[in-house]
Amino acid sequence: MKKRVTKAIFPVAGLGTRFLPATKAIPKEIMMLVDRPLIQYAIDEARAAGIKEFIFVTSRGKSALEDYFDEAPQLEATLRRDGKQELLEVLKSTNMDSGAIAYLRQHQALGLGHAVWCARRLIADEPFAVILPDDVIAADKPCLQQMVEAYAETGGNMVATMEVPYDQVSSYGVLDVERTLGAVIKARGMVEKPAAGEAPSNLAVIGRYILTPKVLRNLDRREAGAGGEIQLTDAIAEEIARSDNVYGYRFQGHRYDCGSKSGFLRATLAFGLARPELRADLEAFIDELYAARKVAQ
Ligand code: UTP
């Protein structure tokens, strides 16, 4: 029987250079869409998929992240005193059960594969999920939950995937497709950041994974790959050769690349428009901007 996936790693130790100077002081994962930080979207998605243990791989300067999940007695007392029950409920979603959350440090940003490898002792011998909080996925059924359901059939290793324009494939890990079985794609290979014209497909790997502990053992050698970084993609690709059990999962939903400025702004707009209390105001503002542009042209 396949083991249930109850542990998730959140690699949040990257330098976030695309958001400098902001990320000099603010971890990227604390930056917010409307009023919730990216990390909250990731945690909610993990909870919906049945994750019980949350492992953060952090780095220097990320203490705001730990504070975010801490209790805030003074704030809570003030809200209680003022009868702000709704806000107290909002705060509840940020509380984590004692012992459910662990923080590890990646001392050097050696790459995503290395960040995941840092959590190897906490994973031990169980399948686990990896969630990259800067990939925010808006979906009726949360993406990781879709994957957990598909994984119940396939087992093995599974990566979220979506089609991207061919001129963007070299920014992603890319799947070489053996065959397609509905939303599930059996992989024949996987390559990180292929050169333009050398990509085996335009199916990009997006930041959700369900992996076997063998992938962690593949990372023991700590070999650098594309861009001089220790790549998670390479360690997963090794499992194709060894066990032939790597699958892509074409999820339902819209992915926002909140690791890039344009993706982050798009997500801010989309999540703002999705809020009933903000929608009319934002729409009116967009119309105004559009009209002003037309006049300027
Ligand atoms: P990115 O490639 O987006 O890198 O990492 P980054 O450092 O966060 O951002 P830029 O490119 O400098 O702007 C993808 C994910 O992998 C994590 C990041 O925190 C992010 O969630 N990561 C990356 C690590 O945890 N450690 C690393 O060494 C590299």
Image (cartoon, rainbow, N blue to C red):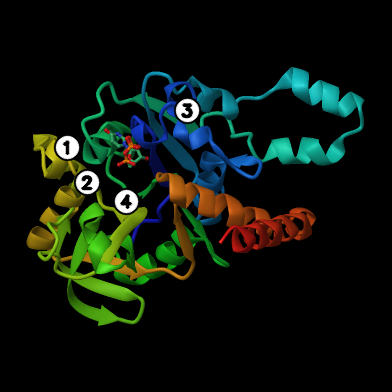
Pick whichever of labels 2 and 4 is earlier in the sequence. 4
Distance from disc 3 to disc 2, alpha carbons, whole Å, reads 27 Å
| Kind of residue indicated by mark 2 | Leu
The image position of residue 204, as x and y in percent, is 28, 62
> SS for tag 4?
loop
| Kind of residue indicated by mark 1 | Glu
Q: Is mark 1 within 8 Å of ligand 1?
A: yes
Residue at 25 percent across and 23 percent down: it is 108
In what quadrant does ligand 1 lie? top left
Q: Residues within 10 Å of mark 3 (few under 14, many from 20)?
A: few
Q: Is mark 2 within 8 Å of ligand 1?
A: no
Point out the image quarter for the C terminus: bottom right
> SS for tag 1?
loop
> SS for tag 3?
helix
| Horizontal side, residue 203 vs residue 272: left or right | left
Q: Residues within 10 Å of mark 2 (few under 14, many from 20)?
A: many
| Kind of residue indicated by mark 4 | Pro
Q: Nearer the viewer, mark 1 or mark 2?
A: 1
Pick whichever of labels 3 and 4 is earlier in the sequence. 3
Q: Report the residue marked by disc 2.
A: 232
Q: Quadrant of residue 290?
A: bottom right
Q: Report the residue marked by disc 4.
A: 127
Q: Report the residue marked by disc 3.
A: 22
| Horizontal side, residue 120 vs residue 266: left or right | left
The image position of residue 57, as x and y in percent, is 36, 31
Q: Report the residue marked by disc 1.
A: 229
